[in-house]
Image (tube, rainbow, N blue to C red):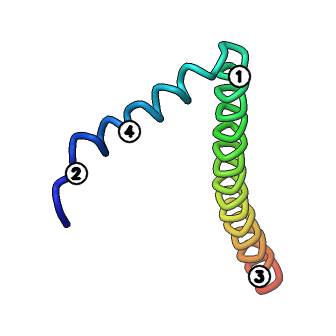
Amino acid sequence: MSKPHAWEVASYVGGLASIGASLSLTSIGAAVGIGTAVLTCLTNTLYTWRRDRREQRESDARLARLSAGSDRADGA
């Protein structure tokens, strides 16, 4: 892979500058809002999944304690 020429770099920089100049504050705000919404959704999904796993472990432990207690009461 060869080193990029100065004209290629200038072309990319000019392209990025024209994209940046074409964006208004409204469109930047919309993009930030969409990004925030997606991150919030992903974070909430992860938190809910972890909470469900934790609650399932607690429920399994509680059922195990209850069944162990009822076995002792039946056997006594």
Mark 2 lies on a secondary structure that is loop
Q: Amino acid at mark 1?
A: Ser
Residues at marks 3 and 2 touching, judged by CB atoms closer than 8 Å: no
- Residue plotted at (66% across, 64% down): 57
- Of mark 4 and mark 1, the one earlier in the sequence is 4
* Residue neighbourhood size for the residue with mark 1, other residues' Cα within 10 Å, grouped as few (<14), some (14–19), many (≥20): few
Q: Percent from the top left, x then y, of residue 65?
A: 70, 68
Provide the residue designation for mark 1: 27
Q: Amino acid at mark 3?
A: Asp
Q: Between disc 3 and disc 1, whose residue precedes?
A: 1
- Sequence order check: which comes first, mark 3 or mark 2? 2
User: Could you tell me which secondary element the residue under label 1 belongs to?
Assistant: helix
| Picture disc at residue 71 | 3
Q: The N terminus lies in which quarter of the figure?
A: bottom left
The residue closer to the viewer here, 70 or 59, is: 59
- The residue at which mark 4 appears reads as 11
Inspect the image, locate mark 2, and give the three-letter code of the amino acid beneath it: Pro
Q: Quadrant of residue 31?
A: top right
- Give the distance between the C-alpha atoms of the residues marked 2 and 4, in whole angstroms: 11 Å
**10 Å neighbourhood of mark 4: few (<14), some, or many (≥20)?**
few
Residue linked to disc 2: 4
Q: Residues within 10 Å of mark 3 (few under 14, many from 20)?
A: few
Quick one: label 2 or label 1, which is nearer the N terminus?
2
- Label 3 and label 2: CA atoms lie apart by 77 Å
Q: Give left or right: position of 63 versus 58.
A: right
